[in-house]
Image (cartoon, rainbow, N blue to C red):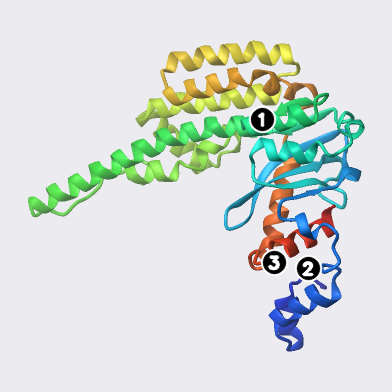
Amino acid sequence: MVSTKPNDCHTIGSFYGVNGKKLQRQYRDCLSEFKEWKDKPHAKDWLIFPENMGKYLSIDETALSKGELYTIITNKKAKGRKGAIVAILAGTKAEPIIEQLLKIPKTLRDRVKEITLDMAHSMKMIAKKCFPKAIQVTDRFHVQKLALEALQDIRIKHRWEAIDLENEQIKQAKGAQKGFIPETFPNGDTRKQLLARSRYLLYKAPNNWTQNQHIRSKILFEQYPDIKKAYNLVQGLRNIFNTATSIQAAYTRLAHWYKDVEQTGFKAFNTIANTITLNYRSILNYFINRSTNASAESFNAKIKAFRAQFRGVKNVEFFLFRLTTIFA
């Protein structure tokens, strides 16, 4: 079976007995049009493709090289193919990005109906200033991620306590010149293992658990009722996004969810509730078209794969040249 996976210069070079680095340099300097690329002088700072503007956009950040962040705007209609990139701009600071995006004709910017983004203030500022007629939609998965992280923090806190307890028991056993035998639960887990192995089941809905995860969850929730409460809050928030059919229905159900959060007394979940309150308009806008930033996250994954194929980004301009040649 013939592989359709793209190969880099190092792979091709090894196949033909040619130095991969030299082949890459030859392609960059002689075979490609990189030297004549008109956008090269400002490529590290900004690249804009007004012809790729669409009615539905995504805005997100990604790291290209050594943790250097870039803001990328993509056209959802292109579905990660040619014409997907609307703009690539260095950094995440709102002011310089706005300055460059305002160079796009206002008639094109006013055609944008919807833009999905995360809850970063800079992203909201960019969307508001550059696409004033577009509805802002906060990506639901960023909201759910906050709740999942709060849940995992509770599990991790208990895990450290379990490790400290086991270490103390081992010391006591050594002091008494006895062998240490840890307590085990009916499924064979020690307390420390129970908390470590429960990580992945807490990310899932109960209907997606395996039989072993069902057994482990029952033990976990019996031993740690606070984890069960936090898990139920996460599932409650997920169910609102999955099943609410209108903004009005979602608003009512979120109000009930806030009440549940207050009753638990979990500080982290109260912080999440406050964050949702501050961003409620853009969060509720999700229920208009059920839009997410999945296309932007998918495109970020393509950039990571592309970066891996280059074995890192040594020449940022050339990397951006190749990226925009394929996706702009």
Q: Is residue 107 above or below residue 285?
A: below
Query: Of marks 2 and 1, which one's residue comes earlier in the chain?
Result: 2
Q: Position of residue 52 (x, y in %)?
A: 88, 44
**Residue 6 - label:** 2
> Which is closer to the viewer, label 3 or label 2?
3
Marks 3/2: CA distance?
Answer: 9 Å
Query: Mark 3 near mark 2, Cβ–Cβ under 8 Å?
Result: yes
Nearer the camera: disc 3 or disc 1: 3
Residue on which the image places disc 1: 140
Which residue was labeled with disc 3? 309
Q: CA distance from mark 3 to mark 1?
A: 31 Å
Image x and y of residue 44, in percent: 71, 55
Q: Is residue 180 visible?
A: yes
Q: Earlier in the sequence, mark 3 or mark 2?
A: 2
Dot 1 crowding, Cα within 10 Å, few <14, some 14–19, many 20+: many
Pick whichever, 228 or 324, lies toward us.
324
* The N terminus sits in image quarter: bottom right
Where residue 196 sits, quadrant-wise, is top left
Q: Residue at x 51, y 39 (%)?
A: 201
Residue sitting at 38 percent across and 42 percent down?
194
Q: Secondary structure at mark 2?
A: loop
Looking at the rendered structure, the secondary structure element under dot 3 is helix
Q: Is residue 146 above or below residue 317?
A: above
Q: Residues within 10 Å of mark 3 (few under 14, many from 20)?
A: some
Q: Classify mark 1: helix, strand or loop.
A: helix
Residue at 60% across, 52% down: 68
Vertical placement of residue 248 versus 220, above or below? above
Q: Quadrant of residue 20?
A: bottom right
**Earlier residue among tags 3 and 1:** 1
